[in-house]
Image (cartoon, rainbow, N blue to C red):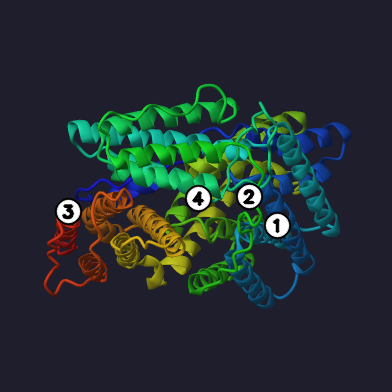
């Protein structure tokens, strides 16, 4: 899933609705989908054939939550998610033992537990998944009568073992699948950037902007998925690697593609990058076949030669080698419990407590669908709460109608198990495309499974479920969104200031002289690389913030729309700083520390909202394009 840069232009009043309903492009995750179908539908089918349908249902419910919680990341990440989230989620069934407690005590306890689950979500993806699963399981435990809850607890662990075993089978069959899944898009995106850069240099235009946005998104995806296993079998699909060296080399290629001004060099870069992508996709070694080098272009600049060198470094980094000591793994426990996490947890606690109180005010037996809806909508790390609430209601209404119709025509047993497996196979794919489509896939499975433990209900309470979903969505919108001014702000200005500060830091370091001594020169190079990465990621964060704000209702979408021209101008400014830094690395322009530092301070000042004071007018010709682009940013800021 690539990031699509925002296009400038006036935002119409209803554009936030279009943005909210947008269906993202996503490749079908074959392994994840097969695993989901087998893990969720398989136990149900076996239980139907052996007469242990209730046991199968509890296992299927566990594996459904695990399938929905799996990330498109490394095996190490997903094994950790299973190991951490399974005991957390299973503990949710303990609330079934106190389901008849006084409603006031139950509401307070539920709110406190929801707050705790929201807070631990800041510790990393495994805890975020576990927290949501705990609340989902707790909702069912509080609302379903006549169950010995020790059995579901044990069977949840059995579901975790089953799902881990299926994931282990894929790991043995396709050990480098997670790496390949991001390496090929990353190399392809860099090749597309090279083509866009060539066309812009040769013909004019601004194709680079969109291509750069996609390349940045692909690089970020790869950066979060460093390899967890050293796979070095020659000739196998694991005959290349993904680690910090690869992503760092890819970032340098991107920077030099943006900074270079030689269309012929960009064309050669495109061919080489596409060849690397083809080799990885085919499972061949990065050094197999023809060498990934081409003769330099006659009369090419030193910058073009450095671009070729950077691609050589990327090709070399892809070759299998022993992992260096101290290589970084993914941070599975981040410890990032800050103010934002606590505020999100407080909103979650308020909404979940009100939802659990539905036992008193919801006039039907399936009241637990109200808190179940709330925790699915308010999962802390999904972006816009408002959009999720609307999409959840829309998706659930359609899903409930579909599931109710299918329950009328498909008898319980093997046929229903096959239907569950079919829906489960779609869950991983639809989760990546739209929240409404995710609800459309998951809701019928939950209905089919929970229907088994509600004998005598007739298995078809469509209007109850729709009403409960609507109430849950309304609780989230009112108590999790509207009454919190903090959540209704666009927050673009703050993120814009961070991005401009990153651009300024990049320029400040790029303008310094390279020391003659090797040690200080290496330190400067490391500082330059870190500054470039920080600036690139800050701009990516700004685009993401803008996209989320555009999917919010007024006033957030109106504010975000006004920022579009300034954000686009800031990206052009960032590219011009990258080009200057490339010229400095190639030694095509001399350093000018005073003027570059003054211009960097001006960029930071503009990002902080400073419109007063005289703008810096550098005398260095290499810095004038940056000053011109900063002037455009200031002009757009005046209109926000």
Residue at label 2?
69
Q: In the image shown, does 372 or 277 lie closer to the viewer?
A: 277
| Quarter assignment of residue 149 | bottom right
| Quarter assignment of residue 522 | bottom left
Left of 506 or right of it: where is 64?
right
In what element is the residue under mark 4? helix
Residue 62, compared with residue 273, is above or below; it is below
Q: Nearer the viewer, mark 1 or mark 3?
A: 3
Report x, y in % for residue 42: 76, 34
Residue 11, compared with residue 515, is above or below; it is above
Residue at label 3?
625
Report x, y in % for residue 394: 47, 46
Residue at label 4?
392
Identified at 33% across, 54% down, the residue is 550
Asked if the residue under mark 4 is in contact with the one under mark 3, i.e. CB atoms within 8 Å, the reply is no
The Cα atoms of the two marked residues, 1 and 4, are separated by 23 Å
In what element is the residue under mark 3? helix
């Amino acid at each position: 899933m690539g990031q699509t840069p925002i296009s400038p232009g006036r935002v119409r009043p209803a554009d936030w609705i279009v943005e909210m309903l947008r269906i993202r492009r996503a490749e079908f995750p074959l392994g994840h989908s097969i695993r989901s179908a087998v893990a969720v539908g398989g136990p149900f089918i076996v239980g139907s054939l052996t007469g242990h349908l209730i046991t199968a249902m509890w296992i299927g419910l566990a594996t459904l939550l695990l399938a929905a919680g799996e990330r498109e990341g490394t095996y190490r990440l997903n094994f950790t998610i299973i190991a951490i989230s399974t005991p957390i989620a299973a503990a949710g069934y303990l609330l079934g033992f106190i389901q008849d407690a006084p409603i006031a005590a139950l509401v307070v306890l539920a709110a406190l537990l929801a707050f705790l689950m929201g807070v631990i979500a800041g510790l990393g993806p495994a805890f975020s998944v576990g927290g949501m699963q705990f609340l989902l399981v707790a909702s069912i435990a509080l609302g379903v009568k006549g169950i010995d809850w020790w059995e579901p607890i044990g069977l949840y662990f059995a579901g975790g073992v089953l799902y881990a075993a299926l994931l282990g089978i894929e790991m043995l069959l396709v050990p480098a699948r997670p790496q390949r899944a991001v390496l090929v898009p990353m190399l392809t995106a860099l090749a597309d950037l090279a083509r866009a850069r060539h066309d812009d240099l040769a013909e004019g235009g601004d194709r680079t902007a969109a291509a750069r946005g996609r390349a940045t998104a692909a690089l970020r995806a790869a950066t979060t998925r460093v390899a967890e296993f050293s796979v070095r079998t020659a000739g196998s699909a694991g005959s290349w690697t993904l680690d910090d060296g690869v992503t760092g080399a890819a970032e340098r290629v991107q920077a030099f593609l943006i900074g270079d001004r030689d269309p012929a060099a960009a064309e050669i870069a495109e061919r080489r990058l596409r060849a690397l992508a083809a080799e990885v996709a085919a499972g061949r070694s990065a050094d197999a076949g023809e060498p990934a080098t081409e003769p330099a272009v006659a009369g090419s600049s030193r910058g073009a030669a450095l671009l070729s060198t950077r691609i050589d470094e990327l090709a070399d980094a892809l070759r299998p080698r022993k992992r260096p000591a101290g290589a970084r793994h993914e941070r599975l426990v981040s410890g990032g419990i800050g103010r934002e996490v606590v505020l999100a947890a407080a909103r979650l606690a308020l909404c979940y407590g009100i939802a659990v109180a539905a036992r008193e005010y919801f006039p039907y037996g399936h009241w637990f669908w109200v808190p179940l809806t709330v925790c699915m909508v308010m999962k802390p790390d999904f972006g816009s709460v408002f959009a999720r609430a609307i999409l959840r209601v829309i998706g659930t209404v359609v899903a409930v109608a579909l599931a109710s119709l299918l329950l009328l025509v498909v008898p319980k047993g093997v046929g229903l198990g096959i239907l569950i497996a079919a829906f489960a196979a779609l869950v991983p794919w639809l989760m990546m495309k739209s929240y409404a489509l995710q609800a459309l896939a998951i809701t019928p499975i939950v209905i089919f499974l929970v229907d088994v433990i509600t004998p005598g209900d007739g298995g078809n309470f469509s209007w109850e479920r729709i009403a409960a979903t609507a109430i849950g969505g309304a609780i989230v919108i009112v108590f999790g969104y509207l009454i919190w001014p903090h959540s209704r702000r666009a927050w673009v200005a703050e993120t814009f200031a961070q991005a401009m500060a990153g651009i300024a830091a990049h320029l400040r370091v790029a303008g310094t002289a390279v020391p003659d001594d090797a040690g200080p020169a290496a330190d400067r190079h490391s500082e330059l690389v870190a500054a470039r990465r920080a600036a690139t990621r800050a701009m990516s964060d700004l685009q993401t913030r803008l996209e989320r704000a555009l999917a919010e209702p007024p006033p957030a979408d109106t504010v975000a729309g006004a920022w579009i021209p300034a954000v686009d101008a800031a990206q052009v400014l960032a590219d011009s700083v990258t080009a200057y830094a490339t010229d400095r690395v190639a030694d095509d322009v001399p350093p000018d520390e005073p003027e570059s530092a003054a211009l960097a301070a001006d960029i930071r000042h503009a990002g902080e909202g400073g419109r007063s004071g005289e703008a810096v007018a550098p005398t260095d010709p290499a810095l004038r394009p940056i000053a011109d682009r900063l002037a455009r940013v200031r002009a757009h800021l005046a209109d926000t």
